[in-house]
Amino acid sequence: MLKSFEHVGMTVSNMDRAIRFYCELLGLTLHLRKKTDDGAELAFLDAGGGMLEIVAPANGAKPAMDVPDDTAGLRHLTFLYEDVDHTFARLEMAGVDIKERPRFAYNPEVLQKVAFVRDPDGILIELAQRKT
């Protein structure tokens, strides 16, 4: 029987930069950080209902590419916030790459408002707010 969502894993090019982005700007909490036997770095970040596993290969990584509409794959990561406008404004002030400004969600049955930004490696991040 399923207990919960555990984690999603992804590759980043720079561990320090990724931790700063996800923890300091998005509000996740560093749960574990260590080096692996092959020289890579591994971290688990707590997102308050699941974890984000990030791996920084010893030799770095190329920037992320968006998944085309006609290709299977992970399209974006979504994090839920009390106030998307406030969170977006804080990220914009920090110089985060903006993809789409806050707007009403296309799926109002699930979400009220969304915005999209990119992490330091170009991974698409959705900021979401549910109806109050």
Image (cartoon, grey):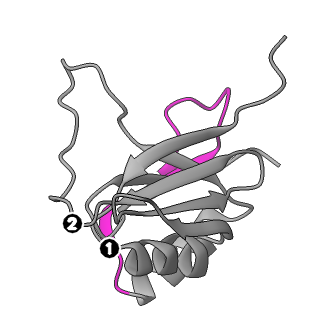
Q: Is residue 73 left or right of residue 4?
A: left
Could you tell me residue 14's position as x and y percent? 32, 73
Quarter residue 50 falls in: top right
Residue depicted at 67% across the width and 31% down the height? 110
Quarter residue 111 falls in: top right
In the image, residue 65 sits, relative to residue 26, either above or below, namely: above
The amino acid type of the residue labelled 1 equals Asn
The amino acid type of the residue labelled 2 equals Gly
Write down the residue under mark 2. Answer: 60
Write down the residue under mark 1. Answer: 14
Q: Nearer the viewer, residue 83 or 71?
A: 71
Residue depicted at 41% across the width and 57% down the height? 55
In magenta segment, residue 49: no
The secondary element bearing badge 1 is classed as: loop
In the image, residue 64 sits, relative to residue 27, either above or below, namely: above
Quadrant of the image containing the N terminus: top right
Mark 2–mark 1 CB contact (< 8 Å): yes
Q: CA distance from mark 2 to mark 1?
A: 7 Å
Q: Is residue 130 left or right of residue 44?
A: right
In the image, residue 51 sits, relative to residue 102, either above or below, namely: above
Q: Nearer the viewer, residue 39 or 21?
A: 39
For the magenta stretch, what is the residue range?
95-114
In magenta segment, residue 107: yes
